[in-house]
Amino acid sequence: VDKGKRPPSPYKTADNGRLVLANERIEVHQNQRDYVGPFEVTDSKQALYLSVAIDGAQNVDVMLIHRGIGEAWLVNYTSQPALGPPPAPPALDELVGTGMVWRRTMPLPVGQYYVVFDNSPAAGKSAPPVIAGDDRAVLVNYAVELGPAP
């Protein structure tokens, strides 16, 4: 990628009336997580549309959490030496495997939300092995859209 340029977006956007909030590619290393957002739902008749595809590792946990919970969890993540689970149950907690495009529509109450990608055994449904000197990074291609709830 040339200096000052962005890499191409992982997903082509469709003319479906949804607002694209994020369309990016990230790398989450072993025992790491990435918080993306917050994304705001401004009307009770809206939903977040999530699309995720991964490469490199066998799976990654995808969690959707309210901003207040997410920020408390983020403070713990950045200030504590040990990884921990979220301080409250997430609105969504699913395992995404390699070789597929995972899609979810999440009608949500008005509020702000984080999407969290976790590549650790500390949270979510997966339990990736922790092998010293072996960084099983996962390449996550994701899109978050806001649109009318179904």
Image (cartoon, rainbow, N blue to C red):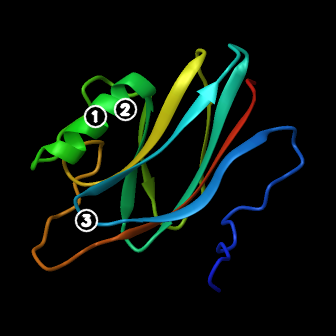
Given the current orientation, which residue lies at the most extreme bottom position?
2
Q: Which mark is residue 73?
A: 1
Q: Is residue 129 above or below residue 86?
A: below
Point out the frontmost of discs 3 and 1.
1
Which disc number belongs to residue 103? Answer: none
Quarter assignment of residue 41: top right
Return the residue at label 2.
Answer: 70
Side of 105 where 58 appears, left or right: left
Residue 138 appears left or right of 123: right
Q: Which mark is residue 30?
A: 3
Mark 2 or mark 3, earlier in chain: 3
Q: Amino acid at mark 3?
A: Gln
Label 2 CA crowd tier, 10 Å (few <14, some 14–19, many 20+) = many
Residue 59 in picture, x, y percent from top left: 38, 60
Amino acid beneath label 2: Gly
Residue 95, given in percent of the width and then of the height, sits at 40, 48
Q: Give the SS element for disc 3.
A: loop
- Please name the residue shown 53% across and 26% down the image: 112
- Compared to residue 138, the image places residue 17 above or below, namely above
Distance Cα–Cα, label 3 vs label 1: 18 Å
Q: Observer-nearest residue: 107 or 41?
A: 41
For discs 2 and 3, the disc positioned in front in the rendered view:
2
Residue at image position (29%, 23%) is: 88
Helix, strand or loop at mark 1: helix
